[in-house]
Image: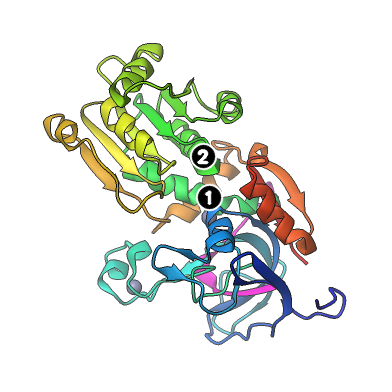
Amino acid sequence: MTSTATAQNLSFVLEGIKQVKFEDRPIPELVDPHDVLINVKYTGVCGSDVHYWEHGAIGDFIVKDPMVLGHESSGVVVKVGSGVTTLKPGDRVALEPGVPCRRCDPCKSGRYNLCIRMAFAATPPIDGTLAKYYRLPEDFCYKLPDSMTLQEGALIEPLSVAVHIAKQGNIRPGNSVVVFGAGPVGLLCGAVARAFGASKIVLVDIQKPRLDFAKKYTATGIYLPQRVSAQENAQRIKEENDLGPGADVVLDASGAEPSVHTGIHVLRTGGTYVQGGMGKNEMTFPIMAACTKELTVKGSFRYSSGDYSLAVDLVATGKVSVKELITNEVKFEEAETAITDVKAGKGIKTLIAGL
Ligand SMILES: [Zn+2]
Ligand SMILES: [Zn+2]
């Protein structure tokens, strides 16, 4: 293992299933005039990092060559290209870790998260942000206001995921929203729903401690699913939370099949269902209920135009608070412990400090 003191760009590299190492890699060069070089300061551990560590793949994305993990980062600008006008060395920024081609149809229509040539950090074969230095175009770095810490800056990534899910849900003031999954993204979905004006926000999870946290954090109601049918669980959610004929919007941040079923059944006629959580590739689906209730059913993937800047704004203006979610912070050298802790379900969000 390379010593921290002598390394130039120490990086946390996944070599294979449960095989990681610290490697001193070259400091990235600025290749485009609009590139900036960032000294990464904090990185949140994401379920996807854990999944790649444990399985070496997510669906069709397979780790074939050693890959740097991490994509939920904040940092300090250390160098800017000749064409950079919006940032200078010393600026503190949140890093948007996926750079689209800017040329394909989805890019040009403003849905760059669907870019066919997306280069996304820590998605094979693209290296992630768990390194001392990382390079990004200036417009994928979001300056943090003085009121925000770099730790909060690392939470902008999962918050942007939640912003995108909530936007897909088309939440209106006064709406009732049921969120499935009270992990970081589900909790943030609840917080964004509140910021968007929802008056009832019910969090559903199979882990009681997470629900207790959700209740303190942002939920107006919580529900622990029982061993009854999806229809019956949906009925109980409606009754216990005065949802009348059903919720206006369901946001899934669990990816679990029972959540999908209960979510469809808990919606009112004409309601909107958003799938944000990733679980099994295929599952059964209550399509008759979706049909006869004329539901709108949408997917949500990562984040797109305006999501990152809105996420920074929500935190800067105090409409969403993210610091409660940070339950653990470890040194860079302890990155693997952070991964195994998250795997073991410890805390809400673990941050790995940079070098
Ligand atoms: Zn993530
Ligand atoms: Zn594109």
Q: Position of residue 118 (x, y in %)?
A: 40, 72
Residue 185 location (% of width, % of height): 50, 43
Read off the magenta span: 130-149
Occupied quadrant, residue 58: bottom left
Question: Disc 1 designates what residue?
Answer: 158
Label 2: which residue? 188
- Above or below residue 131? Residue 320 is above
The front one of 347 and 60 is: 60
For the residues labelled 2 and 1, say whether their Cβ atoms are less than 8 Å apart. Answer: yes
Along the viewing direction, whichever of 152 and 241 lies nearer the viewer: 241
Q: Quadrant of the N terminus?
A: bottom right
Relative horizontal placement of residue 232, taking residue 182 as reference (left or right): left
Q: Amino acid at mark 2?
A: Leu
> Who's the residue at 59% across and 44% down the image?
316
Q: Residue at x 26, y 27 (%)?
A: 265
- Magenta segment includes 148: yes
